Image (spheres, grey):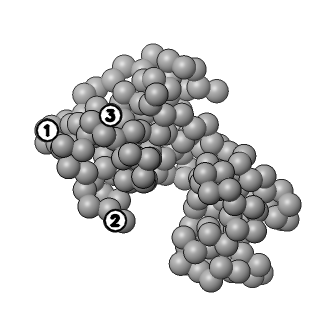
Amino acid sequence: MLTKQDEDLLLRIARKSVEAGFAGGEVPRFETGSKTLEKKMGAFVTLKKQGRLRGCIGFIEGRKSLYKTVEEMAQAAAFRDPRFHPVKEDEIEDLDIEISVLTPLRQVEDISEIEVGRHGIYIVKGFHSGLLLPQVATEYSWDRATFLRETCGKAGLSQDAWKDEDAKIFIFSASVFGED
């Protein structure tokens, strides 16, 4: 769905957005020239420093055009991820940016529908919710049950909360790409 040019532009937008956060200025305006980048789509921006997570924030569903979502989530990942201190200007050269563009959520009736490595999981139970991107399970070599338990943990739920009748499990796929 995304061309190589679309991916390259989104990565450039993400990096320029983080850099603009240091300058205290506005993010430059980008002309996308792509109908795909104008579509409302969910996306996450992940920042890694020397292979370690440094920030990751996104929208599950499309609220704004994809390129605007990437622009805003890049700054959020760099400066507002509550798990980390804000990125410092001297770190910018060491950051690797990865973008995950999400397909729409689909609720599953049976966990056998979850394909590890292909699907991400979003669990909702009461006021709690948690999401893990598809690549997380692959990076840690998790099986389906571990992936479900870890997603529950991210939601602040007990590890077996996914088994509860009132728990809703959604899956999605993602187009994942990053800087070389």
Tell me, for residue 15, which label it has, or none.
3
| In contact (CB < 8 Å): disc 3 and disc 2 | no
Q: Residue 159 vs residue 45: left or right?
A: right
Q: Quadrant of residue 93?
A: top left
Check disc 2 and give the amino acid type: Pro
Q: Earlier in the sequence, mark 2 or mark 1?
A: 1
Q: Residue 118 vs residue 88: left or right?
A: right
Check disc 1 and give the amino acid type: Ala
Report x, y in % for residue 119.
71, 50
Report x, y in % for residue 113.
83, 56
Q: Earlier in the sequence, mark 3 or mark 1?
A: 3
| Residue sitting farthest toward the front | 50
Using the image as rendered, state which of residue 170 and residue 142 is in the foreground. Answer: 142
According to the picture, the residue beneath numbered tag 2 turns out to be: 82
Tell me, for residue 23, which label it has, or none.
1
Using the image as rendered, state which of residue 17 and residue 33 is in the foreground. Answer: 17
Residue at 71% across / 48% down in the picture? 117
Residue 39 visible in the current orientation: yes
Q: Earlier in the sequence, mark 3 or mark 2?
A: 3
Check disc 3 and give the amino acid type: Arg
Tell me, for residue 8, which label it has, or none.
none
Dot 2 alpha-carbon crowd within 10 angstroms: few under 14, some 14 to 19, many 20 or more: few
- Give above or below for 24 relative to 156: above
Dot 1 alpha-carbon crowd within 10 angstroms: few under 14, some 14 to 19, many 20 or more: few
Q: Residue 91 vs residue 56: left or right?
A: left
Cα distance between the residues tagged 3 and 1:
13 Å
Cα distance between the residues tagged 3 and 2:
20 Å
Using the image as rendered, state which of residue 4 and residue 116 is in the foreground. Answer: 116
Residue at 44% across / 31% down in the picture? 179
